[in-house]
Image (cartoon, rainbow, N blue to C red):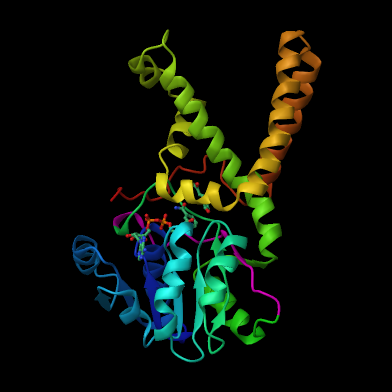
Amino acid sequence: MSKPLFDTLAIIGPGLIGSSIMRAARAQGAVRSIVTSSRSPETRARVVALGIADKVVATNAEAVQDADLVIVCVPVGVCGAVAQEIAPHLKTGAIVSDVGSVKASIVRDMGPHLPDTVHFVPAHPVAGTEHSGPDAGFAELFENRWCILTPPEGTDKEAVDRLSAFWTLLGANVEIMTPEHHDLVLAVTSHLPHLIAYTIVGTADELETVTRSEVLKFSAGGFRDFTRIAASDPTMWRDIFLANKDAVLEMLGRFNEDVSALTKAIRHGDGDALFEQFTRTRAIRRGIIDAGQDTPDADFGRPHGHDD
Ligand SMILES: NC(=O)c1ccc[n+]([C@@H]2O[C@H](COP(=O)([O-])OP(=O)(O)OC[C@H]3O[C@@H](n4cnc5c(N)ncnc54)[C@H](O)[C@@H]3O)[C@@H](O)[C@H]2O)c1
Ligand SMILES: O=C(O)C(=O)C[C@]1(C(=O)O)C=C[C@@H](O)C=C1
C-alpha cells in the first residue's frame, strides 16, 4: 500500500459517489483517516454499520475542521449552500473539491464563499450508476474512468497536482479543462442521453394503446437500457438540467434537427440516409470499445448497490 497523500479526508454527503470515494481511498491507503457528515440519523447509522469512515458526525462544519482534503458530494443545487456553511471552519491550506456533474455553476456558487486560505479545485469523476445512498457505493467505481478537474485560473499548481494524484490512486484518468468546456462536452455525452431516457420511458408509460404490463413484458432490449438510465436520482438530475441550461439547450437544438432529418428519411422511405447514419454511429461505438473505454456489455460484471 502506498504512503497516504492526505492526513484527513472529509466527505460531505456519503451517498453513491461520496461512499465510493471513502471505500476507494481506504482500499488504496490514499488517506490516514476519513470523516463524513450527514444530518440524517439513519444515514449516519448506515455509514457506521458499513464501516467505511473513521468518524461520522452530524454537521458539515464539524466534518471539515481537521480535514486537509474536503470533497463535497451533494447534489449540484446545494453545493453553494454547503460551501457557505463550511467556509468558516476550513483548515488553512486545505484543498476543497466537489464531484458535481456540472462545473461552471459550481465555480459560480461555491467559489465566492471559500476563503483565500484554502485551495478550490472543482472535479467531476465521470463514473456512476442509477443508484443512490451509502449502500450503493463501491471501491472500484472510478477504475479506468475519467476524472475531470476544472481549477479556476491562478489555482496553486501543487494543490491541483495533489488532487490529481489522489484521483489517479483511486484508479481514474485525470484530465484538466475549463468549466465551460466541461459543461458543453458533458451536455452531449451525459446530460442529453439522460434527458432522452427520461423522455422515452415517460412516452412509453403514457401510451394508451399499450398497457404498462406490455411495456414491462417486452422491455428486454434497447428499452430496458433506457429504463436503467431513467431510474437515476430525480433530485440530482433536476439540479443538473437547471445548472447546465445553456449547454443542454444548445445540444438539444442540434439533436432535434437530427431527429427531424431522420423523421424525414423514414417518411420518404430514404433507406440510404438511414443506412448511412446507422453505419456512422456503429463505427463510433466500435471506436469506444477499441479505445478500451468500455466493454461490449458495459453493465455486465459491475457491482451494483441498492437504492437508499
Ligand atoms: N450518481 C452518479 O452517477 C454521479 C456520477 C458523478 C457525479 N455525480 C455527482 O455527485 C453528486 C452526488 O451524487 P450521488 O449520486 O452520490 O447522490 P446521492 O443521493 O447518492 O448522495 C448525495 C448525498 O448528499 C446528501 N445531501 C443532500 N443535501 C445535502 C446538504 N444540504 N448538506 C449535506 N448533505 C446533503 C444526501 O443526504 C446524500 O447523502 C452530485 O452532485 C452528482 O451530480 C453523480
Ligand atoms: O452509468 C450511469 O448510470 C451514469 O449515468 C453515469 C454518468 C454518465 O452519464 O456517464 C452520470 C452522471 C455523472 O455525472 C457521471 C456519470
Residue 150: say if magenta: yes
Q: For this view, does 206 lie left or right of residue 273?
A: left
- Relative to residue 11, is residue 205 depicted above or below? above
Query: Looking at the image, how many numbered discs can be counted on the residues?
Result: 0
Where in the figure is residue 14, as x and y percent of width and height?
Answer: 34, 64
Residue 26 seen in the figure: yes
For the point 19% across and 60% down, which residue is it? 42
- Relative to residue 107, is residue 92 depicted above or below? below
Quarter of the image for the N terminus: give it: bottom left
Question: What are the residue bounds of the magenta stretch?
Answer: 135-153
- Relative to residue 185, is residue 177 depicted above or below? below
Residue 85: say if magenta: no
Q: For this view, does 182 lie left or right of residue 2?
A: right
For the point 43% across and 65% down, which residue is it? 73
* Front position in the image: 5 or 124: 124
Where in the figure is residue 256, as x and y percent of width and height?
Answer: 69, 29
Magenta stretch: dominant secondary structure: loop
Where in the figure is residue 50, as x and y percent of width and height?
Answer: 24, 65
For the point 44% across and 80% down, which residue is it? 87
Q: For this view, does 72 lie left or right of residue 165?
A: left
Q: Residue reaching furthest bottom? A: 92
For the point 40% across and 75% down, which residue is it? 85
Residue 233 seen in the figure: no
Where in the figure is residue 12, as x and y percent of width and height?
Answer: 38, 70
Ligand 1 quadrant? Answer: bottom left
* Front position in the image: 198 or 189: 198
- Relative to residue 107, is residue 298 depicted above or below? above
Q: For this view, does 219 lie left or right of residue 47?
A: right
